Amino acid sequence: MARTAPVNRIGLLTGGGDCPGLNAVIRAVTKDAIGHGIEVVGIEDGYLGLIENRTRLLSHDDVSNILTAGGTILGSSNKANPERFAVGKNQDGTPKFQDMTDLCMRNIEMQGLDALVVVGGDGTMTGSQVFIKRGVNCIGVPKTIDNDLHGTDLTFGFLTAVQIATDALDRVHTTAASHHRVMVVEVMGRNSGWIALHSGVAAGADIILLPEIPFDPDIVARVCQQRSRRGKRFTIICAAEGAKPAGGKIVIERTDPTSPDPIRLGGVSRLVASMIEQKTGLESRYVVLGHVQRGGTPVAADRVLATSFGDYAMDLLLGAKKNRMVAYQGGQYTDVALVEAAGKQRTVPHDHPLMAAARSVGTSFADRE
């Protein structure tokens, strides 16, 4: 891609939930930009920093030695929607919202930003649309441990989350075997089962429960009983937090009405473990991995992916491309219209090859005998 220099000063923000690899993107974008004489303004805490005009100019030294660090040196926020920002409460106690788009635009102009590089998932990409409509060039970099962003086969953060979940499943395997228990490990993923599918297959889970496939509680119980009768006196179950029984509902831990995504999932592992004990009498335990999957050092593959994404984002800016999102499709780096990723989720198709591979080795998805 031919490189010119259509921009002089860009804003860079990391929105949504944190994940390993964010700092690798910050490093790649900043070093590449500085090398072309472009100033990079780091916007703190995602869109919240844009609303509150909290920024800092990033130097070469600021981004040195951060490649292996988890999290983000700029901070993040998954509650700051510029079009619907919580500013207090109404008289009836409900959250009061205000459109902060005009304020954000004034801050963008005050900072002299020629473009925004927005690093995040579907919420962050959706949030960029209001600025695109106002004429701001936004370049998206796909990030989410859930791997559920439309338009790309892979997002950085996902591979690290899968490795962490796999390690956890490996560890409960030995204690499950020692105590002859059923162990249910709950992993993140919201409405998509990519983490559960990949980590479940990697760890040899006996049952994998996905949001895309409502599970039959009786089949779950029968699989556990059949293993016990065959002398396999333990069962490992990997459950996505959005999994639900056929005809039932997802398990909601709590809701946050001030957040753009108010539903907080959690608790399906406890439900499944309790159900198994009631139906079979087999001792069952559950583990909720939660934010452990988001933390720590990114695996090598995520560092490479994040660095490549950051470099490609600069290619787009220097090539005078507008409102595009970096993507990884079919083993190649490419880009798609940023609007394609906004407000959409990429879920696991029922005919995915990895599901077929899992079924072939006897893994149950509790949807059929």
Image (cartoon, rainbow, N blue to C red):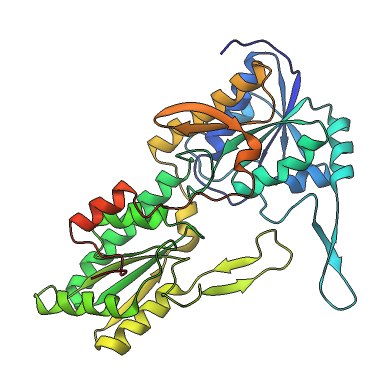
Quarter assignment of residue 281: bottom left
Snapshot quadrant of residue 98: bottom right
Q: On the picture, is 71 further left or further right than 104?
A: left
Residue found at the very far left of the displayed protein? 231
Query: Above or below — where is 24 with respect to 114?
Result: below
Q: Residue at x 76, y 35 (%)?
A: 132
The quadrant in which the C terminus is found is bottom left
Q: Position of residue 45 (x, y in %)?
A: 70, 47
Residues 320 and 145: in front is 320
Q: Is residue 82 left or right of residue 149?
A: right
Residues 2 and 288: in front is 2
Q: Quadrant of the N terminus?
A: top right
* Residue 202, visible in the rendered structure: no
Residue 330 location, quadrant? top left
| Count of numbered circles on the image | 0
Image coordinates of residue 181 in percent, x first then y, are: 23, 77
Given residues 254 and 344, the one toward you in this image is 344
Across and down, in percent, residue 288 comes to: 43, 68
Please name the residue shown 19% across and 55% down the image.
360
